[in-house]
Image (cartoon, rainbow, N blue to C red):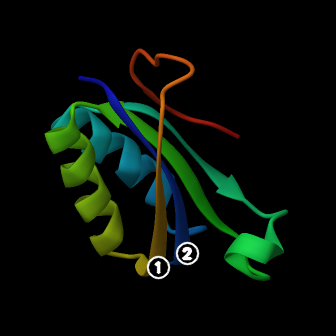
Amino acid sequence: MLKQAHLYIKGEVIGVGFRAWTKIQAKIIGVSGWVRNVYNRPDIFGENGGVEALIQADEEKVNKMIEMLKIGSPVSRVDDVEVYFQEPKEIFDGFEIRK
């Protein structure tokens, strides 16, 4: 059964290749969706922005991807990840980096 998680990733995650690393992890784990930098939501991410992601797959893969994002890439620092499980409204084929 398809699961979807919408994530807000906070910390040192902009300008360190986090989105590219996330796309690689998504391909390895086998999840679909997207990732993007967010600068205009200080209410969520603070003054420096953060990363937003949406991932879809079966529950095991979604949970594995969430755990990877909580750890972060070798050159990033993840301080917090907010996870919101949702009903999929759109089915994604593959994983993309959005602007």
Using the image as rendered, state which of residue 30 and residue 57 is in the foreground. Answer: 57
Sequence order check, earlier mark of 1 and 2: 2
Callout 1–callout 2 Cβ contact below 8 Å? yes
Which residue sits at x=69%, y=74%? 45
Q: Is residue 99 above or below residue 89?
A: below
Tag 2: amino acid: Lys
Which residue sits at x=49%, y=52%? 19
The disc placed on residue 10 is 2
Q: Is residue 99 above or below residue 65?
A: above
Give the side of residue 1 with respect to residue 50, left or right. Answer: left
- Which residue is most to the right? 40
Q: Position of residue 35 (x, y in %)?
A: 53, 44
Give the side of residue 69 with respect to residue 47, left or right. Answer: left
Give the side of residue 42 with respect to residue 82, left or right. Answer: right
Q: Secondary structure at mark 1?
A: strand
Q: Position of residue 25 (x, y in %)?
A: 27, 46
User: Label 1: which residue?
Assistant: 80
Q: Mark 1 to mark 2: distance in Å?
A: 5 Å
